Every structure is written in structure tokens, then in C-alpha cells.
Amino acid sequence: MATAFDLTTSSLTSSLRGWRGTAAFHPAQRQPKNPLELYDIEACPFCRLVREALTEFDLDALIRPCPVGGQRYRPRCEELGGRQQFPFLVDPNTGRQLYESADIIDYLATTYQRPAPGTHGLRRRLAVATSLAASAVRYGHGRKARPSRAPDQPLELFSFESSPNVIPVRERLCELELPYLLRNTGKGRWTDMGPPAVRDRLLHAPGATTRNRKLLFERTGRVQVPYLIDPNTGVEMFESTAIVAYLDKTYAA
């Protein structure tokens, strides 16, 4: 469980966005053969819109964190696309490279066959405004780089965008410039809603309602996020405060 401060402010962040990035009721009909790559800043309001879509489309992505002051992936973004602007999507399956959150979301919907949410006009302006407000709530978190040691292999994180318990973990991964495979674990049915204790004990909800929820259930016997896998050390763990402490101990310089 996140600290009380993190849980409160992260919940407010997600509330301001209407809890977008929670459910994958209408997943993409196609899955990419190779992981999408997203050059991303956790605190960036435009990056958030793309990550929400990834959850709702049930698409995974290899996150290459690019916090302010970071030197690990920002130069590579500029080398590929011509400028350090985020989000920046690289799709190794098609060779496409895109800036601009609305263009990225439209591209993902078209390419992987999923109805696109409103990305233009009034809905777009409202999404940007509320995402800006959400970033302000957690201002200073997930934005600036901290000295760190690079892992040999990317980590893996089971997550869905709006989860208040996951937000502090993704923030620290960004600050430490730690690449990770984001395994989106969106909720596939209404019975998935609510905390695990309520969902599992009262609703007796099935654990495998989406692709990664099934994978997580088979691996651990329960569906709870965040869940971190570090192939560099063999560590696998739940609980956001424990994960943040582990990341600091293992990778912070």
C-alpha cells in the first residue's frame, strides 16, 4: 500500500481524469508482435493521455523514461525523431515513429483495431486541461532525474494507469531512468472494480478477465498491482512502498 500522502494525492490525480486508464472493456483486436516503445515522462500530462489509452486498449509498451535532466534516453529520442519532445512512440512492428499524444492514440487505434476515443475538438481540450490539473497535484514527482545505475535488462511492471498504488512506483522508475516493460493490467469486467479484498471476498470475481490479469494470476495466485519483476536480481514483489524502497536501494546512486 502507498503512504497516506501518496494514496490521497494519487487518488486525486486519477479522479481529476475521471479514472481514465482503469478498464480494458474494449481491448484492441490485434496485439503487436514486438513491444511498442514509449519515450515518456511520468508527470507529463500528454504522456498520461497515451498511457491511459494503452491501458484501455490493453497494449503493453517498453517505457524508456526521459525525466528532465535525464541522459539515458533523451538523446536517443532526439536522435530518432529530431527533438526531445514527449511522448514519443516507436513501433518496431511497422517502423512508425510519432510525436503528439493525439496522433499516437489515433495511430494505435487504427493499427491495432480498436475504436478511438475522442482525440480532437472539445473532448481533446478537456482531456488536456484535466491532465494538466492532475499533474499539478503530484508536481515534483516523476519529473526530474535522479542519479542511478542502469539495469542490464528492463524491469517489468504490472500496472494500470489510474491505480493510486502504482503511480508512486512509476514515478520512481521515471526519476531513476529505469526502463521497464509496462504490462497493462486493466480491469476487464465491472466485478474487477474495487480493492482486491472486496472484489475477491464479496464478489468472488474471476482473476483472468484480461490478458495480463490472467498472466499475473497464473504467476502469483492473485491479481493485485503494482507487481514488479526484476530479471536482473530475480526479485518479484507486490506493495508500492516496498517496491520504491527496493528501487532506491538497488539502483539509486
Image (cartoon, rainbow, N blue to C red):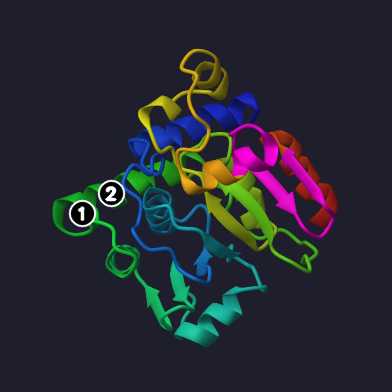
- What is the number of callouts on the image? 2
Kindly report the distance in space between the C-alpha atoms of the residues bearing marks 1 and 2.
9 Å
Q: Quadrant of residue 174?
A: bottom right
Crowding at dot 2, Cα within 10 Å, few <14 / some 14-19 / many 20+, comes out as many
Relative image position of residue 225 (x, y in whole percent): 59, 37
Q: Dot 2 lies on which element?
A: helix
Q: Dot 1 lies on which element?
A: loop
Q: Residue at x 76, y 49 (%)?
A: 247
Q: Amino acid at mark 1?
A: Gly
Q: Residue at x 78, y 69 (%)?
A: 152
Horizontal side of 231 relative to 183 (left or right) equals right
Q: Is residue 193 magenta?
A: no
Q: Residue at x 20, y 54 (%)?
A: 118
Mark 1 or mark 2, whichever is nearer to me: 1
| Mark positioned earlier in the residue sequence (1 or 2) | 1
- Residue 225 seen in render: yes
Viewer-closest of 107 and 48: 107
Q: Is residue 229 magenta?
A: yes
- Residue 141 seen in render: no
Which residue is the site of mark 1?
118
Crowding at dot 1, Cα within 10 Å, few <14 / some 14-19 / many 20+, comes out as few
Horizontal side of 68 relative to 83 (left or right) equals right
Q: Residue at x 65, y 63 (%)?
A: 179
What quarter of the picture does the C terminus occupy?
bottom right
Relative image position of residue 88 (x, y in whole percent): 45, 71
Q: Amino acid at mark 2?
A: Ala
Q: Quadrant of residue 30?
A: bottom left
Which residue is the site of mark 2?
127
Q: Which residues are magenta?
A: 216-237
Judge whether 102 appears above or below 205 on screen.
below
Relative image position of residue 249 (x, y in whole percent): 84, 48
